[in-house]
Amino acid sequence: MEKIRLELIGITYNQIESGVYAVILQQAGGTRRIPIVIGFPEAQAIECKLQEVVTPRPLTHDLMVNVMSTFGIVLKEVYIHRLRNGVFAAELLLKNEYGEKVIDSRSSDAIALAIRVDAPIYTTPEVLEEAGFEPGERSGKENADDTKTIETKKRDNRKDDYTRKSVEELKAMMQKAAESENYEEAGRIKRELDRRSAE
């Protein structure tokens, strides 16, 4: 079976339907993309890892990685496929000293795990063709005009608040947000700190 590697390029937020997020995967070495609708907790888990937000206690996917590591289990790869009803599902290929095992998973959980251990994500040419789209091309409810990345949307709303704060104030705010488990806010503050460091 031919497999095509996918790369995570970000998360979008649907401005029309509140609380609807989608993770965007792109063909490695190509431009075709696949949007997969996910819930807020999964979007938060993925965004926390992308923004390298350090949480005071492990999130669910961090806990899973810790358990796997403790028992010598390695996530070799994630394979995303599409069910007959159009919903995306995934398989985890796990390996330990006793051999390999394939485990069924939600695609959002599989992606959240994969990015934490740098495991490759694959799909088939058929799924990429049927569910994929080119940037700027309408694909179901996902459209560049309808969505913004979480980063852009939140920055639009809070940019002025952050620009008025000192680096020390921002660091204190990020720590407080992480301690209260407001990881989305902590991620936004970290992006502002990173932006200032790069300037």
Image (spheres, rainbow, N blue to C red):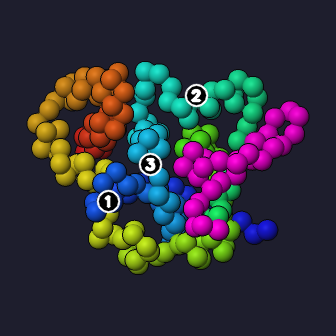
Q: Are marks 1 and 3 in contact (CB under 8 Å)?
A: no
Query: Mark 2 packing: few (<14 Cα in 10 Å), some, or many (20+)?
Result: few
What's the residue type where badge 1 is placed?
Glu
Give the image location of residue 78, x and y in percent.
67, 51
Q: Is residue 9 visible?
A: no
Disc nearest the viewer among 2 and 3: 3
- Tell me if 153 is positioned left or right of 159 in this view: right
Residue at 79% in and 68% down: 1
Question: Which label sits on residue 39?
Answer: 3
Give the image location of residue 154, x and y in percent.
25, 48
Q: Are marks 2 and 1 in contact (CB under 8 Å)?
A: no
Residue at 32% in and 59% down: 17
| Residue 93 sits inside the magenta stretch | yes
Give the image location of residue 179, x and y in percent.
35, 21
Q: Nearer the viewer, residue 15 or 23?
A: 15
Q: Please give the residue where the numbered disc 2 appears in the rendered image.
A: 63
Q: Which residues are magenta?
A: 84-110
Q: Nearer the viewer, residue 59 or 97?
A: 59
Disc nearest the viewer among 2 and 1: 1
